[in-house]
Protein backbone atom coordinates (compact mmCIF):
# COMPACT_ATOMS: atom_id res chain seq x y z
CA UNK A 1 0.00 0.00 0.00
CA UNK A 2 1.37 3.41 -0.95
CA UNK A 3 0.55 6.82 0.54
CA UNK A 4 1.40 10.03 -1.27
CA UNK A 5 1.01 12.97 1.11
CA UNK A 6 0.49 16.46 -0.31
CA UNK A 7 1.54 18.79 2.47
CA UNK A 8 3.27 22.07 3.26
CA UNK A 9 4.92 20.27 6.22
CA UNK A 10 6.52 17.02 4.97
CA UNK A 11 8.65 16.84 8.13
CA UNK A 12 5.49 16.11 10.16
CA UNK A 13 4.80 13.11 7.96
CA UNK A 14 8.35 11.78 8.11
CA UNK A 15 8.45 11.56 11.92
CA UNK A 16 5.28 9.51 12.17
CA UNK A 17 5.66 7.31 9.12
CA UNK A 18 9.15 6.16 10.09
CA UNK A 19 8.04 5.00 13.57
CA UNK A 20 6.15 2.06 15.07
CA UNK A 21 3.80 -0.04 12.96
CA UNK A 22 4.14 2.23 9.90
CA UNK A 23 7.93 1.95 10.06
CA UNK A 24 7.74 -1.84 10.44
CA UNK A 25 5.41 -2.07 7.44
CA UNK A 26 8.01 -0.29 5.32
CA UNK A 27 10.84 -2.51 6.56
CA UNK A 28 8.74 -5.48 5.41
CA UNK A 29 8.17 -3.74 2.03
CA UNK A 30 4.41 -3.84 2.59
CA UNK A 31 3.98 -0.08 2.96
CA UNK A 32 5.62 2.91 1.32
CA UNK A 33 5.08 6.64 1.23
CA UNK A 34 6.35 9.88 -0.24
CA UNK A 35 5.45 13.54 0.18
CA UNK A 36 4.95 16.37 -2.25
CA UNK A 37 4.94 20.01 -1.23
CA UNK A 38 2.52 22.22 -3.22
CA UNK A 39 5.15 24.98 -2.93
CA UNK A 40 7.15 23.11 -5.56
CA UNK A 41 4.36 23.92 -8.03
CA UNK A 42 4.25 27.70 -7.58
CA UNK A 43 5.46 30.13 -10.22
CA UNK A 44 6.00 33.39 -8.29
CA UNK A 45 9.19 34.41 -6.53
CA UNK A 46 7.62 34.02 -3.06
CA UNK A 47 6.37 30.51 -3.80
CA UNK A 48 2.90 31.58 -2.65
CA UNK A 49 0.44 28.81 -1.86
CA UNK A 50 -2.30 30.99 -0.34
CA UNK A 51 -4.14 34.27 -0.87
CA UNK A 52 -6.87 36.38 0.73
CA UNK A 53 -10.45 35.12 0.42
CA UNK A 54 -12.84 36.73 -2.06
CA UNK A 55 -15.69 38.36 -0.13
CA UNK A 56 -13.41 39.15 2.80
CA UNK A 57 -13.02 37.31 6.07
CA UNK A 58 -10.28 36.08 8.35
CA UNK A 59 -7.43 33.88 7.25
CA UNK A 60 -5.90 32.88 3.98
CA UNK A 61 -7.13 30.31 1.47
CA UNK A 62 -4.92 27.76 -0.27
CA UNK A 63 -4.62 28.46 -4.00
CA UNK A 64 -6.20 25.96 -6.38
CA UNK A 65 -3.38 25.92 -8.95
CA UNK A 66 -0.44 24.59 -6.84
CA UNK A 67 -2.76 21.94 -5.33
CA UNK A 68 -4.01 20.96 -8.79
CA UNK A 69 -0.47 20.59 -10.11
CA UNK A 70 0.57 18.60 -7.03
CA UNK A 71 -2.33 16.18 -7.52
CA UNK A 72 -1.57 15.89 -11.26
CA UNK A 73 1.99 15.00 -10.27
CA UNK A 74 0.65 12.25 -7.93
CA UNK A 75 -1.53 10.92 -10.76
CA UNK A 76 1.56 10.58 -12.95
CA UNK A 77 2.91 8.21 -10.31
CA UNK A 78 -0.34 6.20 -10.25
CA UNK A 79 -3.19 7.31 -12.58
CA UNK A 80 -5.79 5.48 -10.48
CA UNK A 81 -4.67 6.81 -7.11
CA UNK A 82 -7.59 7.73 -4.82
CA UNK A 83 -7.34 11.45 -4.08
CA UNK A 84 -8.55 12.13 -0.54
CA UNK A 85 -8.81 15.66 0.84
CA UNK A 86 -8.81 15.75 4.64
CA UNK A 87 -11.54 18.16 5.65
CA UNK A 88 -13.84 18.78 8.62
CA UNK A 89 -16.64 18.93 6.03
CA UNK A 90 -15.97 15.41 4.71
CA UNK A 91 -17.52 12.04 5.47
CA UNK A 92 -16.62 10.80 8.94
CA UNK A 93 -13.71 8.30 8.91
CA UNK A 94 -14.47 4.94 10.52
CA UNK A 95 -13.18 1.40 10.86
CA UNK A 96 -15.78 0.27 8.32
CA UNK A 97 -14.57 2.82 5.82
CA UNK A 98 -10.93 1.86 6.47
CA UNK A 99 -11.67 -1.84 5.92
CA UNK A 100 -13.53 -1.12 2.68
CA UNK A 101 -10.73 1.10 1.29
CA UNK A 102 -7.98 -1.30 2.42
CA UNK A 103 -9.32 -3.74 -0.19
CA UNK A 104 -9.01 -1.16 -2.99
CA UNK A 105 -6.84 -1.92 -6.00
CA UNK A 106 -4.55 -0.19 -6.67
CA UNK A 107 -3.75 0.37 -3.00
CA UNK A 108 -2.48 3.86 -3.71
CA UNK A 109 -3.80 6.88 -1.79
CA UNK A 110 -3.07 10.56 -2.31
CA UNK A 111 -3.80 12.33 0.99
CA UNK A 112 -4.04 16.09 0.64
CA UNK A 113 -3.57 18.21 3.76
CA UNK A 114 -5.17 21.63 3.92
CA UNK A 115 -3.88 24.53 6.01
CA UNK A 116 -4.95 28.09 6.88
CA UNK A 117 -8.70 28.71 6.45
CA UNK A 118 -8.96 25.83 3.97
CA UNK A 119 -8.69 25.45 0.20
CA UNK A 120 -10.35 26.95 -2.86
CA UNK A 121 -13.56 24.92 -3.32
CA UNK A 122 -13.05 24.73 -7.09
CA UNK A 123 -9.95 22.58 -6.55
CA UNK A 124 -12.08 20.17 -4.48
CA UNK A 125 -14.71 20.02 -7.22
CA UNK A 126 -12.15 19.28 -9.95
CA UNK A 127 -9.45 17.17 -8.27
CA UNK A 128 -10.77 15.31 -5.22
CA UNK A 129 -12.33 11.83 -5.18
CA UNK A 130 -13.32 11.79 -1.50
CA UNK A 131 -13.42 14.25 1.39
CA UNK A 132 -12.71 12.63 4.74
CA UNK A 133 -13.17 14.10 8.21
CA UNK A 134 -11.70 12.88 11.48
CA UNK A 135 -14.67 14.28 13.40
CA UNK A 136 -16.62 17.37 14.26
CA UNK A 137 -13.72 19.51 15.43
CA UNK A 138 -11.21 21.76 13.72
CA UNK A 139 -7.54 20.92 13.35
CA UNK A 140 -5.01 23.53 12.24
CA UNK A 141 -4.00 21.36 9.33
CA UNK A 142 -4.81 18.09 7.58
CA UNK A 143 -1.55 16.30 8.47
CA UNK A 144 -2.80 14.68 11.69
CA UNK A 145 -5.93 13.55 9.87
CA UNK A 146 -3.96 12.21 6.88
CA UNK A 147 -1.66 10.28 9.21
CA UNK A 148 -4.64 8.85 11.11
CA UNK A 149 -6.14 7.66 7.82
CA UNK A 150 -2.82 6.20 6.63
CA UNK A 151 -2.20 4.45 9.96
CA UNK A 152 -5.67 2.91 10.13
CA UNK A 153 -5.38 1.69 6.50
CA UNK A 154 -1.77 0.53 6.69
CA UNK A 155 -2.27 -1.65 9.77
CA UNK A 156 -4.94 -3.60 7.86
CA UNK A 157 -2.48 -4.72 5.18
CA UNK A 158 -1.84 -8.44 5.83
CA UNK A 159 1.55 -8.94 7.49
CA UNK A 160 2.01 -5.35 8.68
CA UNK A 161 0.94 -6.22 12.22
CA UNK A 162 3.03 -8.94 13.83
CA UNK A 163 -0.07 -10.97 14.55
CA UNK A 164 -2.67 -10.86 11.75
CA UNK A 165 -5.40 -11.83 14.19
CA UNK A 166 -4.92 -8.73 16.29
CA UNK A 167 -6.65 -6.35 13.87
CA UNK A 168 -9.57 -8.82 13.71
CA UNK A 169 -9.99 -8.68 17.47
CA UNK A 170 -9.84 -4.91 17.75
CA UNK A 171 -12.93 -2.90 18.56
CA UNK A 172 -15.37 -2.50 15.62
CA UNK A 173 -13.90 -5.44 13.66
CA UNK A 174 -16.48 -7.97 14.82
CA UNK A 175 -20.11 -6.85 14.54
CA UNK A 176 -19.19 -3.30 15.53
CA UNK A 177 -18.48 -4.42 19.10
CA UNK A 178 -16.01 -2.81 21.52
CA UNK A 179 -13.20 -5.18 22.45
CA UNK A 180 -13.13 -6.71 25.93
CA UNK A 181 -10.65 -4.77 28.12
CA UNK A 182 -7.09 -6.15 28.36
CA UNK A 183 -5.07 -6.89 31.49
CA UNK A 184 -1.48 -7.85 32.23
CA UNK A 185 0.65 -8.28 35.34
CA UNK A 186 0.31 -7.67 38.25
CA UNK A 187 -2.81 -9.66 39.12
CA UNK A 188 -3.94 -6.87 41.40
CA UNK A 189 -3.49 -3.14 40.80
CA UNK A 190 -4.79 -0.53 43.30
CA UNK A 191 -7.07 -3.19 44.81
CA UNK A 192 -8.56 -4.03 41.43
CA UNK A 193 -8.12 -7.69 40.42
CA UNK A 194 -7.72 -9.22 36.99
CA UNK A 195 -11.17 -10.78 36.39
CA UNK A 196 -11.11 -14.42 37.50
CA UNK A 197 -12.54 -15.77 34.23
CA UNK A 198 -9.37 -14.69 32.37
CA UNK A 199 -7.24 -16.88 34.64
CA UNK A 200 -9.13 -20.16 34.16
CA UNK A 201 -7.04 -21.47 31.25
CA UNK A 202 -10.30 -22.61 29.60
CA UNK A 203 -9.96 -20.77 26.28
CA UNK A 204 -13.45 -21.55 25.05
CA UNK A 205 -14.96 -20.18 28.24
CA UNK A 206 -12.66 -17.14 28.16
CA UNK A 207 -13.72 -16.32 24.59
CA UNK A 208 -17.41 -16.65 25.52
CA UNK A 209 -17.01 -14.36 28.50
CA UNK A 210 -14.90 -11.86 26.60
CA UNK A 211 -17.74 -11.67 24.10
CA UNK A 212 -20.23 -11.16 26.93
CA UNK A 213 -18.15 -8.22 28.20
CA UNK A 214 -17.94 -6.83 24.65
CA UNK A 215 -21.71 -6.95 24.34
CA UNK A 216 -22.22 -5.17 27.66
CA UNK A 217 -19.61 -2.48 27.09
CA UNK A 218 -20.95 -1.75 23.61
CA UNK A 219 -24.56 -1.60 24.80
CA UNK A 220 -23.79 0.71 27.74
CA UNK A 221 -20.86 2.81 26.48
CA UNK A 222 -21.71 3.12 22.80
CA UNK A 223 -25.48 2.85 22.32
CA UNK A 224 -25.02 4.30 18.80
CA UNK A 225 -22.85 1.31 17.80
CA UNK A 226 -25.21 -1.08 19.54
CA UNK A 227 -28.12 0.18 17.51
CA UNK A 228 -26.16 0.12 14.24
CA UNK A 229 -26.54 -3.70 14.00
CA UNK A 230 -29.35 -6.14 14.61
CA UNK A 231 -28.58 -7.78 17.98
CA UNK A 232 -29.69 -10.91 19.77
CA UNK A 233 -31.44 -9.58 22.88
CA UNK A 234 -31.32 -13.00 24.57
CA UNK A 235 -27.53 -13.12 24.23
CA UNK A 236 -27.35 -9.65 25.79
CA UNK A 237 -29.60 -10.67 28.71
CA UNK A 238 -27.49 -13.79 29.30
CA UNK A 239 -24.37 -11.64 29.38
CA UNK A 240 -26.04 -9.26 31.80
CA UNK A 241 -27.18 -11.97 34.21
CA UNK A 242 -23.65 -13.48 34.19
CA UNK A 243 -22.07 -10.06 34.83
CA UNK A 244 -24.36 -9.49 37.79
CA UNK A 245 -22.78 -12.51 39.49
CA UNK A 246 -19.30 -10.94 39.34
CA UNK A 247 -17.72 -9.27 42.39
CA UNK A 248 -18.04 -5.51 42.32
CA UNK A 249 -14.27 -5.11 42.11
CA UNK A 250 -14.17 -7.24 38.94
CA UNK A 251 -16.97 -5.18 37.42
CA UNK A 252 -14.92 -2.11 38.18
CA UNK A 253 -11.84 -3.70 36.59
CA UNK A 254 -13.94 -4.34 33.49
CA UNK A 255 -15.17 -0.74 33.39
CA UNK A 256 -18.74 -1.91 33.91
CA UNK A 257 -19.44 -1.08 37.54
CA UNK A 258 -20.95 2.32 36.83
CA UNK A 259 -23.03 0.92 33.98
CA UNK A 260 -24.76 -2.09 35.47
CA UNK A 261 -27.97 -1.85 37.50
CA UNK A 262 -26.39 -2.99 40.79
CA UNK A 263 -26.60 -1.37 44.20
CA UNK A 264 -23.21 0.18 45.10
CA UNK A 265 -21.11 -1.42 47.88
CA UNK A 266 -22.88 -4.77 47.53
CA UNK A 267 -20.64 -7.65 46.51
CA UNK A 268 -21.60 -10.76 44.62
CA UNK A 269 -19.95 -14.16 44.76
CA UNK A 270 -18.46 -15.47 41.52
C1 LIG B 1 -8.28 25.33 10.10
S1 LIG B 1 -8.78 24.04 9.03
C2 LIG B 1 -9.91 24.86 7.95
C3 LIG B 1 -11.35 24.64 8.33
C4 LIG B 1 -12.34 25.36 7.43
N1 LIG B 1 -12.26 26.78 7.60
C5 LIG B 1 -13.75 24.89 7.75
O1 LIG B 1 -14.34 25.46 8.67
O2 LIG B 1 -14.26 23.94 7.13
C6 LIG B 1 -7.37 23.78 8.05
C7 LIG B 1 -7.23 22.37 7.46
O3 LIG B 1 -7.17 21.42 8.48
C8 LIG B 1 -7.71 20.19 8.05
N2 LIG B 1 -8.75 19.77 9.02
C9 LIG B 1 -9.26 20.53 10.00
N3 LIG B 1 -10.15 19.86 10.73
C10 LIG B 1 -10.22 18.62 10.20
C11 LIG B 1 -10.98 17.46 10.50
N4 LIG B 1 -11.85 17.44 11.49
N5 LIG B 1 -10.79 16.36 9.74
C12 LIG B 1 -9.92 16.35 8.72
N6 LIG B 1 -9.17 17.43 8.38
C13 LIG B 1 -9.31 18.56 9.10
C14 LIG B 1 -8.24 20.42 6.64
O4 LIG B 1 -7.31 19.90 5.70
C15 LIG B 1 -8.36 21.91 6.56
O5 LIG B 1 -8.20 22.41 5.26
Image (tube, rainbow, N blue to C red):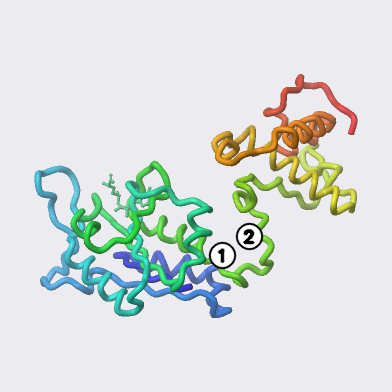
**Residue 63 picture quarter:** bottom left
Q: Which of 225 and 43 is in front in this view?
A: 225
Q: Left or right: where does residue 240 sit relative to residue 90? A: right
Label 2 or label 1, whichever comes before in sequence order: 1
At mark 2, the secondary structure is: helix
Q: Left or right: where does residue 173 sit relative to residue 54? A: right
Q: Is mark 2 within 8 Å of ligand 1?
A: no
Identify whether 29 is placed above or below 199: below
Residue 245 coordinates in the image, percent (x, y): 84, 30
Q: Please tell me how crowded label 1 is: few (under 14), some (14-19), or many (20+) other residues with Cα within 10 Å.
A: many
**Residue 144 picture quarter:** bottom left
Residue at 53% across, 76% down = 26
**Residue 196 picture quarter:** top right
Identify whether 51 is placed above or below 177: below
Q: Residue furthest top?
A: 263
- Mark 2, residue position: 167
Q: Which of 63 and 15 is in front in this view?
A: 63
- Mark 1, residue position: 155
Residue 203 coordinates in the image, percent (x, y): 85, 54
Q: Nearer the viewer, residue 256 or 121?
A: 121
> CB under 8 Å between callouts 2 and 1?
yes
Q: Which of 14 and 94 is in front in this view?
A: 94
Residue 79 coordinates in the image, percent (x, y): 33, 76
Alpha carbons under labels 2 and 1: distance apart: 8 Å
Q: How many labels does the image show?
A: 2
Quadrant including the C terminus: top right
At mark 1, the secondary structure is: loop
Amino acid sequence: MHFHFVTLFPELIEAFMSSGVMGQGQKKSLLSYNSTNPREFTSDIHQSVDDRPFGGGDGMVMLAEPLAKAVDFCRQEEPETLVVYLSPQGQRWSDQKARALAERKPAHFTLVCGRYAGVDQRWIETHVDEEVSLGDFILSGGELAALAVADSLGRLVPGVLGNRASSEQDSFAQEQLLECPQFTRPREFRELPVPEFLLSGNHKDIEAKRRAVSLLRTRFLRPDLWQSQSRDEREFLQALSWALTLPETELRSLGLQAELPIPKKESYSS
